[in-house]
Every structure is written in structure tokens, then in C-alpha cells.
Image (cartoon, helix red, strand yellow):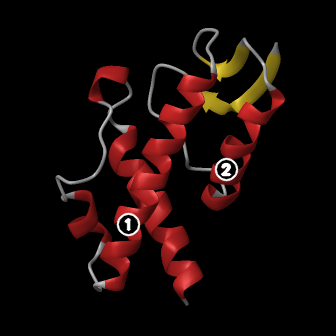
Amino acid sequence: MLFVGDLIFEGRYPFLATANVPDLMEALRWIPGFGARVIVPGHGVLCGTEDITGQLDYIERTWTRTAEHVALGHSVEEAINDPEYPRCAELGFEQLHAWNIKVVYRQVKKRSG
């Protein structure tokens, strides 16, 4: 059993507002190596490594898509309106979709100089 706290938001969009997103992605890649059969998330019900993989995939795809927008000189509003972003509407907390893009956009911009 592994307690991961706020690294995992099982069953909903992750809340990225206070995250250093690259560090979060690195931590999520690291967790399966512990070999835990049961993971206690900070939000949601008990889960397994497949939930970590799903959350990591969402965050990585959001980061990659946002980096593409930044490279093209698009505004954050243009990025938010892009229908190609991964969505997890069935998970709940859909309002975090746009918020997470804003957070990632700001971090990508800062890293790209």
C-alpha cells in the first residue's frame, strides 16, 4: 500500500494550480516503481498504477499540446479553445480543464524564455 497524497486525483481532473508540472510528471513516472498493489490518493478512492498512468498521460499530453501553442505564438485563450486537448469530462471537475491549460501555459512560457 502506498500513500501518495496530492500527487493523485483519482476519478477527476488533477488540480495543477500549485504544481510544478514537470516535477509532477517526473514523480508520477516514479511511483509505479514502488510496486504497490493499492495506492491511496489524496483525492478519490483507492486505486492502482493504471490510474497513475492515466493521469500522467493527461498531463503529458496537455504539456505537449501547450508547448506547441506557445511555439506558434498563440495566446492562452487560443490554447484553451483548442479542441485537440485531452479531456476527461467523464471524471468530473471539468472546470479544471481550462484552469490546467492556463497553469501549463504559464510554465511552458517561463521555460521557453
Quadrant the C terminus occupies? bottom right
Relative depth, front residue between 39 and 91 = 39
Whether residue 14 appears in this view of the structure is: no
Q: Is residue 39 above or below residue 57?
A: above
Q: Is residue 13 above or below residue 20?
A: above
- Please tell me in which quadrant of the rendered image residue 84 appears: bottom left
Disc 1, disc 2: CB below 8 Å? no
Residue 60 x %, y %: 48, 53
Q: Is residue 99 above or below residue 14?
A: below
Element at label 1: helix
- Residue wearing tag 2: 24
- Residue wearing tag 1: 66
At x 59% / y 9%, what residue is drawn? 45
Q: Is residue 2 above or below residue 27?
A: above
Residue 49 falls left or right of residue 38: left
Structural crowding at the residue carrying mark 2, measured as other residues with C-alpha within 10 Å and reported as few (<14), some (14–19) or many (≥20): some
Element at label 2: helix
